Image (spheres, rainbow, N blue to C red):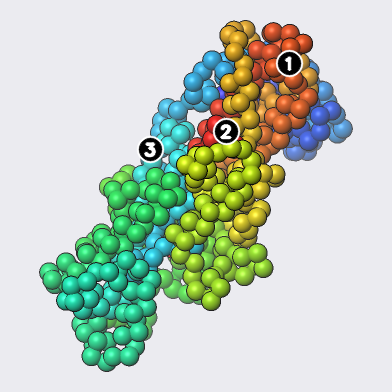
Amino acid sequence: MKFKSLINDKLQAAFCKIGITPDMIAVSDASKPEFGDFQYNGVMAVAKKLGRNPRDIALLLADNIHGDMISKIEVAGPGFINIHIDKEWLGSKVTELFNSKDLTIEKNQNPKTIVVDYSGPNMAKEMHVGHLRSTIIGDSLANLFEFLGERVIRQNHIGDWGTQFGMLIAYLEEVHQNSSFDELKNLEDFYKLAKKKFDDNLDFAKKAREYVVKIQSGDKHCLELWKKFIDISLSHCDEVYKKLGVTLTKEDVRAESFYNDMLPSVIEKLELSGLLQISDGAKCIFLPNSEVPLIVQKSDGGYLYASTDLAAIKYRNDVLKADRICYVVDARQSEHFAGVFWTAKESGLCNSDVVLEHIAFGTMMDKSGKPFKTRDGGTVKLIDLLDEAVIRAEGAIKDRANFSNDEALSLAKIIGIGAVKYSDLSINRESNYIFDWDKMLSFDGNTSLYMQYAYARIQSILKKFDGEIFGSVELGSDIEHKLAIMLLSFEDILRRAANDATPHTITSYLYDLVTIFMRFYEQSPILRDDVPYNVKVSRIMLSTVAARTIKKGLEILGIEVVDRL
Ligand code: ARG
């Protein structure tokens, strides 16, 4: 249910009745209980524009807001409108939620095609922590858009092309001749060994350079080796995706090399549009607000990262028919995307109404505020980090209940991976992010464990209740009223998170919801014998809807719940 829209519509109707047309109406949550449930503070701006007294307008509006969802309207201060939602109406809506299976969220009637470009590791190396944020944030956004009914196309823009592949292929051929692929099990070492040989051995370096030319000119043997290398690298990625529980599959891979054949026509289109200029022999585009031009073809004819991205936009526009393209990529690439987006629009490679968005995120830091590295200063392999998460999660839960070893391990997987994901998603994505094991694996605070614990607790109450559930939600106390408001706000939150591409909007909501639920749970006995049956049922219904909301919220973020903790 679009809760806030209902209230906004009422305000809109009231404005209409008093003959005023405001620009936009948006109520906000009331900051204090005495201000009611929602507050509208747009009257002052409207009054100023019209040169009228805001309080007069607010009073007029208040007289014209009606409906059974509203119990009281007050005008406060210079012209704030405080809106109180009717308890019975709220109760009936939560009852509806209880009786519906999908939390009454309607799928968009006119779905948009949204391309989500995320993960995008480079094939020369194993996935490292630098790829974690893109993978997690991108996956949760793809889930969110899909849940709201959009047509989502996941694209994994892997880096599988470039000069370093000459070196890797030359080395692979040597290893291959020794009939052993073992060294490739560890891509990181493989890369280091190849690089060492490249630096130490002139003949090898020469061969590697020849390979670059050969691959690029389509030499069959070289391409076969190259393909073998990419396949092995990709299966490493798949292992990480599986461990992480992200939805990316091999079908979502649209690698840089996929666009090779389109590159000449992209350059041609840029030429025709008159944007292209030659600078030091390279083909460049000079951008309006930047000193640095976007280079699309080097003087030796080679293409670059930007050329491929322009071809990818054309493909997503012409073939995938995207309405919105979200690039979930490190904030340090914002200049690149600003240049690419401007060029794509200006040259007509992309229709003007397609929304191009760089969903930027900050760097992952360690506890001391430095970029995340291993003890000896190397990059942390993602797979190692995920394995450590599971081990640490096992430590965090081992003293809690009598879990069998199998049970503890499967719980630890859910909890450990959930913690890594949640802690990342719960901060504003544009900030740098401090990776802190202790904080993320805590039962208190804004953590996945806190949510999973609340969920498990509700499950145990529901299991103990053996009565039949019929009746409706009757909201007694203020905390029940507040809980109902929260439950009904879920769709508003999801739509906001989708619009702004901010998963932390969902985590903040879940944290508030669970905090309120815990307060409700402390104040309102459910199973105690002296609780009247209708009250029991009402509280069970509230708890059930809360559990479903927590579960769905976490599921969108790619995090599982557990029944026992
Ligand atoms: N491979 C790139 C990197 O590791 C990320 C790709 C992002 N997507 C894109 N369309 N440029 O930096």
Q: Quadrant of residue 85?
A: top right
Disc 1 marks which residue? 528
Q: Nearer the viewer, mark 3 or mark 2?
A: 2
Q: Quadrant of the C terminus?
A: top right
> What is the crowding at mark 3: few (fewer than 14 residues within 10 Å), some, or many (at least 20)?
some
Left or right: 272, with 221 as reference point: right
Q: Of helix, strand and loop, which one carries label 1?
A: loop
Instruction: Report x, y in % for residue 510.
Output: 63, 37
Q: Is residue 239 left or right of residue 388?
A: left
Q: Earlier in the sequence, mark 1 or mark 3?
A: 3
Give the image location of residue 475, x and y in percent: 72, 16
Residue 61 in view: no
**In x, y percent, where is residue 120?**
39, 59
Q: Residues within 10 Å of mark 2 (few under 14, many from 20)?
A: some
Q: Which residue is mark 3?
A: 151
Distance CA(mark 3)–CA(mark 2): 35 Å
Is 131 on the left-hand or right-hand side of 539? left
Instruction: Specify whether residue 100 is in view.
Output: yes
The location of residue 192, given as percent across then percent down, is: 37, 78
**Residue extending furthest toward the left:** 220
The residue at 50%/59% (across/down) is 385
Is there CB contact under 8 Å for labels 1 and 2?
no
User: Along the horizontal axis of the image, is 427 left or right of 251?
Assistant: right
Q: Residue at x 45, y 53 (%)?
A: 135
Q: Is residue 106 above or below residue 446?
A: above
Report which residue position mark 2 lands on.
Answer: 564
Question: Looking at the picture, does residue 129 appear above or below residue 144?
Answer: below
Of residue 167 and residue 463, the one placed in the foreground of this image is 463
Task: Of the two numbered discs 1 and 2 on the same chain, state the one appearing first in sequence.
Answer: 1
Residue type marked 3: Arg
Marks 1 and 3 sit apart, C-alpha to C-alpha, by 47 Å
Looking at the rendered image, the quarter that the N terminus falls into is top right
